Amino acid sequence: MATNHRIYMDHAATSWPKSEAVLSAMTDFIRNCGSAAGRGGYRSAVEADRLISLVRRQLAAFIESPSSDCISFHSNGTAALNTAIYGLVGPGDHVVVSAAEHNSVLRPLHELAQRSGVRLSIVPVSVGGAVEVDHFLEAIEPETRLAVLTHASNVTGVMQPVAEIGKSLRSTQTALLCDAAQTFGSVPISVSELGVDLLAAPGHKCSGGPLGTALLYVSPELHEQIRPSVYGGTGSQSESLEMPLSMPQKLEPGNLNVPAICGWGVALTELGDLGTRQQHSLSLSRKLHEGLRGISSLSVHGSEGSLPIASVTMEGLDPADLAAILDSEFGVEARAGFHCAALIHEYLGTESKGTLRLSAGHGTQIAEVEMVIRAVSEVVEELGRS
Ligand SMILES: Cc1ncc(COP(=O)(O)O)c(C=O)c1O
């Protein structure tokens, strides 16, 4: 039976719906201000600048950054991660990453390895998708320039031991970059408690901001060292052919997406108590994992964690077919395939066709997760009979 009802289960890609207040903030800016930020002395340009500074300060407070100068805005998580990687890693450097990373980390590093002789050590993950602290630390050499670890996998939702690794790397010359794409807005984040030197996060996932938003945190110790990887106008020192040396301007060439950033700022004010959000995520995660594990012939990959993400496969069934039936027959929107994570599938045993990923969000109701489980169960039973 085809349905028009929509159960959105792809929050790990981007959250939906966005709140009315987020949409209003965006249209309000476009309609009533609309000027470029940092590029003029007239009133509306100054107002655009003020709005950007406000959200920058909100973000700094949100991750306990020592200063809002440590926060630069980017168009998405990928751009923020590339800014960090290309800004610090140079020819001949050594970099350590986990096999659980997203391609927005793996592909720039692969490119640097191919063209600039960067040496890459890829740390395996367990069958459950977790990185072992000892394995990760053993890969670090005295000259390792950068270590990159995702806060949580976008394929399994499994949280990685960033704080433990951060603690061990604190007094070394290795900078630690955390990819918080799946946790920012869902799990409390303190850059000092995590012990990270850099942290990248899109605004359009768990924190409820619009597409076109992301932040990069760069610790004050790295402000001088980090190099721009995109060059252009910053609205400051325009008489010079050199990029400004000051942060965050040196990482923000070109016009910022002011409407989206205004929307993100409002989304941040709507998050409320992160402890309560985390509790809801945990309940959704339990419901999702328990329900899916109860369906015989279905394999659930990764261990149950605090994020409501689950990846499943079924012997002899292409996850893409499962996703198509769930969508057309039950209105369940979920993603099938490799989820832009090239290496983790080898460890999960899902390297042939990837997985079907079901990811709930903060607005998802427990009843919706129950409907999703019933739908998956019906499809699996039906296919098992045919
Ligand atoms: C773990 C992880 N890192 C990075 C990204 C890239 O973020 P964006 O899609 O905003 O470029 C994603 C997006 O799915 C992700 O899940």
Image: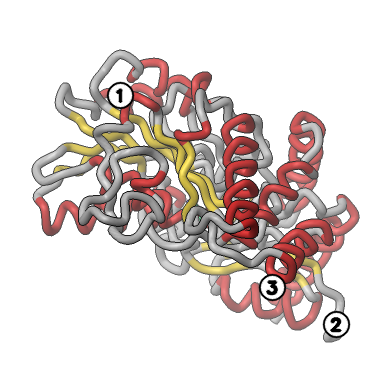
Is the residue indicated by label 2 positioned so its CB lies within 8 Å of ligand 1? Answer: no
**Which one is closest to the eye, mark 3 or mark 1?**
1
Callout 2: SS:
loop
Three-letter code for the amino acid on which mark 3 is drawn:
Gly
Three-letter code for the amino acid on which mark 2 is drawn:
Thr
Whether residue 339 can be seen here: yes
Callout 3: SS:
helix
Residue at 10 percent of width and 46 percent of height: 91
Sequence order check, earlier mark of 2 and 1: 2
**Which one is closest to the eye, mark 2 or mark 3?**
2
Q: CA distance from mark 3 to mark 1?
A: 45 Å
Residue at 44 percent of width and 54 percent of height: 349
Whether residue 358 can be seen here: no
Callout 1: SS:
helix
On the image, the x and y values in percent for residue 81 come to: 39, 49
Mark 2 vs 3: CB contact within 8 A = no
Three-letter code for the amino acid on which mark 1 is drawn:
Leu
Which of 11 and 77 lies nearest the eye of the viewer? Answer: 77
Question: Which residue carries the number 3 mark?
Answer: 384
Residue at 27 percent of width and 32 percent of height: 224
Residue positioned most to the right: 367
Q: Quadrant of residue 185?
A: top right
Question: Which residue carries the number 2 mark?
Answer: 3
| In the image: residue 211, left or right of residue 239 | right
On the image, the x and y values in percent for residue 339 come to: 49, 62
Using the image, tell me which numbered label, if any, was put on residue 30. Answer: none
Sequence order check, earlier mark of 2 and 3: 2
Question: Which residue carries the number 1 mark?
Answer: 137
Q: The C terminus appears in which quarter of the rendering? A: bottom right
